[in-house]
Image (cartoon, coloured by chain):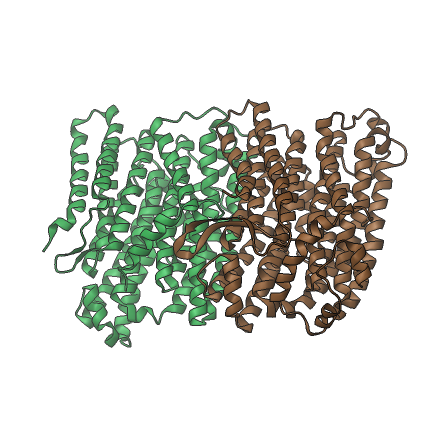
Amino acid sequence: MSILTYILGWPLLAALALVFVPRNYRVIIRAVALLATFISMLLAIKMFCQFVTGHAGYQFEQQIPWVESLGISYHVGVDGINVGLILMGAIVAFAATCCSFEIQSREKEFYILLLVMSGGILGAFASLDLFCFYFLHELALVPTFIMIGVWGRGERKNYATFQITLYLSVGALIALIGLIALYLQSGANTFDIPKLIEYVQAHPLAAKAQNFIFPLLLFGFGILVSLWPFHTWAPLGYSSAPSPTAMLHAGVLKKFGLYGLIRIALPLLPLAAQSWMQILAWLCLGNILYVGWVAMRQKDLNLLIGNSSVAHMGFIFLGIASLNLIGVTGAVLIMVAHGFLAALTFALSGYIYQQTGTLEMSRLGGLCRKLPFIGTALLMAAMAGCGLPGFANFVGEVTVFFGAWSQPSLHVVTVLAVWGALLIGALYMLRAMRHVLHGPVPEKWSGIPDASNVWRKLPYALLLASLLVFGCFPRLLTEKITPDVKKIMGLTAPAPIGNKMMAQTDLSNIRNPQSAIRNQ
Amino acid sequence: MNASLMNLEIWVVGLGLVLMLADVFMPAERRRFLAYGAIAALTTMLVINWGHETVGTAFNGMFVQDGLAIFFKRFFLVAAILVLFLSAEFSDRLATGISEYYSLIVFALSGMLFAASANNFAMLFVAVELITVTFYVLVSFQRNRLVSLEAGVKYLILGALSSAFMVFGIALVWGTTGKLDFGELAAVAAQFADNKIFLLGVLLVLVGLGFKIAAFPFQIWAPDVYQGAPTPTTAFLAIGSKAAGFVLLLRVLFTAIPGVTAHWTNPLILISGFTILYGNLCAIPQQNLKRLLGYSSIAHAGYLLLGVAALSASGQAATLYYLGGYLFTVLGAFTVIGLVMRHLENEDLSALGGLNQRSPLLATTLTLAMVSLAGLPPLAGFFGKFLLLKAVIQQAQVTANHGYYCLAFTALAGVVISLYYYFGVIRAIYWSKGAADLSPIALSGPAKFTLAICIAGMFWFGLFPNTLLHLATEAVTALK
């Protein structure tokens, strides 16, 4: 049994076990959920440490046939691209379970759904089988809808539930058609990703077929990742969701689409990727500039965070659109960093909402004095969101910008995106912090408690620590990511002009952003 | 002449007669046990026959026992067993003659078994009539209820109309070709491919079958009849009668007239697409749960037709697989409806309010059934839809017919629309306000058993598709 099977198996097994626990055993239900996600997190850390850098091929692989006649199998394994994502997912899952204090009604169902969601998404990232990959993602997606509908908050809860359900299902189904078409077109009669890549390398798909399938995957996955202009489900959905759900979805589940693009679309459909990337680059400006601008206008803290999380997706898309080693490496870095960041901000806003009953910024103020721990954590999260050095996001964004700049056709886009990152992001984040954390404390919130004991502080501290660790030692990730991204870029024939740039710089030894800068 | 092939049918008919006679000797309060007797008998037949079916033909090829027939016979037996469980729970609603009700279900079952083996137009007509005529009675069984009678009359008129079409079509086919046997017909059909009268005859037969499966534009009866009929009848109609329609459709299209079918790609695509859209769109505003499921069953007829329209073995196998998953899903849903709404006059969605407090098991089953109908993993509906879509896209790539891509996207649109109303049902269960009645619902042992079987079926076919997929793939090798 591979360690990956245990990482995703523990939450799913715990979910199954909880079905048989009577609903009034609240402590036991909570303890089981915490224990399962904690073990899963420890195993993920262990796996991350044991990962052999530079090892060719996949590690911790396991394959069990599932439906032989169609070539479907349960196949898990990690390489540099998903090892960080799985670690991030496991940490966020544990943090989300810790933050589920706020759920007071129907806890049994909530924890079951939360565990299914965690197991499903970890499985989706670990999968090396197209069918499994999609199946486990859907498995994680369905609980999201139910959780928002039942435990959500705000007046527009019902609307938000239906919107997110329909929107994300459309995205998932479009991607499904794309994946089925890809499977059939390849003629390899297997859903196994490594085998498919190998087969397609020998028998490349016709350009016409690629150009038909690629947009299905791009927009199907794009809807799932809130690519502009298909992003409108995200801010409202997240602001209506209970915070553990928002943490897991915005942090982890949303990265599925991006991961799918890097893992499947780029290596299998290289020709189409070349021609569609220019369009993707312009669309991602919509995320960075337009959604950033929308975020500036928000009066509700959660809507602001939701919009900012959509805006951050733009940087990842830009990294993918640059189609070179640095850019895609940066994209993977931001995926990991943003996972921690989104989870942290939604957890903190959830805490504030629980204490004050509102997230309207005009009604909050001075919370830093009353809630020193939460306030400081929120401030640090905001700084990470602005891309301050020292946090993992900075590393990723800088790398993405270098990658995008080295693609001459993306110069304009890059310049505009840098403005978006520096100016717009800082503007709305700092303004929000001033409203929420500084100024006089309204009378009615003079008595609200801070996160008092270690248990309450744990999830926030854990997420912050992860952001800082990967911010200060990005090499932990980059040295794992680069060899495998290089492999994928080798399959995706580089663009004619970008090729020259790639040749000039030896990019294989990016240790950290500083050396990347020196290389440039 | 090999009458031993018909053992199963003979035993089932015998069982129906015994049930009818037992009515005379059984005191009224014990008649519930007749259902359990019938269930035991059918289960015994299923188990004894499983794996021991002999393949062959009887009555000069009128009756065929092949992989497809065997697959569907098992299917019908399982459906009838679960429906009988449901009827036993429902028996106190039927004021008169409950044992007749059981025997009618068993007779309808025998009709379905014959339909699975029909290899001749005369046999096809007899089987269809045996099913339809028993259903006339089953639908209007609650004689003291106006809606039930209304449903019965509607089903009678439209059913008779479609039977008339079908028999007229058969007459035209026979008149032009002189053949009734599917095998013989297939040999000569190519010569008649341009004969307008022959084609009209085939078309009329398909109209009759379209009525059975409630495909657009022959679906008009379904919502009214589903709503008015007693719940066990609706359940049997939704699964048994529809599956019988599909097995006959597959036989006619792919063994009797394969040469003609090959030219009918586009009409089949259109019918499938319209059926999906019609069923799903009309289901949106429904407030009556059984009516909603009536429209959803139209939509599912459309999904099942995807596999038929694909005109490929993988499409046919996908249809069979989908039916297998649909069996447990639909019966789970109707069992819950039957149990919750036993004592209510209107079967509105609002009656589901607070169900998760009244009975968590019922709430869970209905939720899972809705999720499976919507086609979300890890339940049976997902894998079925996956196979159907795969078959359609495959055919699109093989034939380069863009209609297939349109069909795939129509199916996708249908799935998204259906999420809206299926989630409406789930919402009614979990978070509707002001539920009037919060008294717990007591469940009998057999009812719990039925629900457990349905849940297990939904999960099993969603997570371990191998067995059923293998059976379905084997079964369709019987079709050319």
| Residue at x 65%, y 43% (from the top left corner) | A49
Q: Is residue A224 in sight in this rendering?
A: no
Residue B208's quadrant in the figure? bottom left
The one of B187 and A488 positioned closer to us in this rendering: A488
| Residue at x 15%, y 45% (from the top left corner) | B10
Which quadrant of the figure contains the C terminus of chain A?
bottom right
Q: Is residue A53 in sight in this rendering?
A: yes
Where residue B234 sits in the image (x, y, percent)?
A: 35, 43
Q: How many marks?
A: 0
Where residue A133 sits in the image (x, y, percent)?
A: 53, 51
Please identify the residue farthest to the right as the structure is shown: A439
User: Horizontal placement of A317 versus B365: left or right?
Assistant: right
B95 w.r.t. A409: above or below: above
User: Horizontal placement of A200 versus B128: left or right?
Assistant: right
The one of A157 and A16 positioned closer to us in this rendering: A16
Where residue A290 sits in the image (x, y, percent)?
A: 77, 57
* Figure chain in brown: A
The one of A111 and A340 positioned closer to us in this rendering: A340
Q: Colour of chain B?
A: green
B8 w.r.t. A13: above or below: below
Where residue A401 sits in the image (x, y, percent)?
A: 77, 60
User: Horizontal placement of B330 versus B136: left or right?
Assistant: right
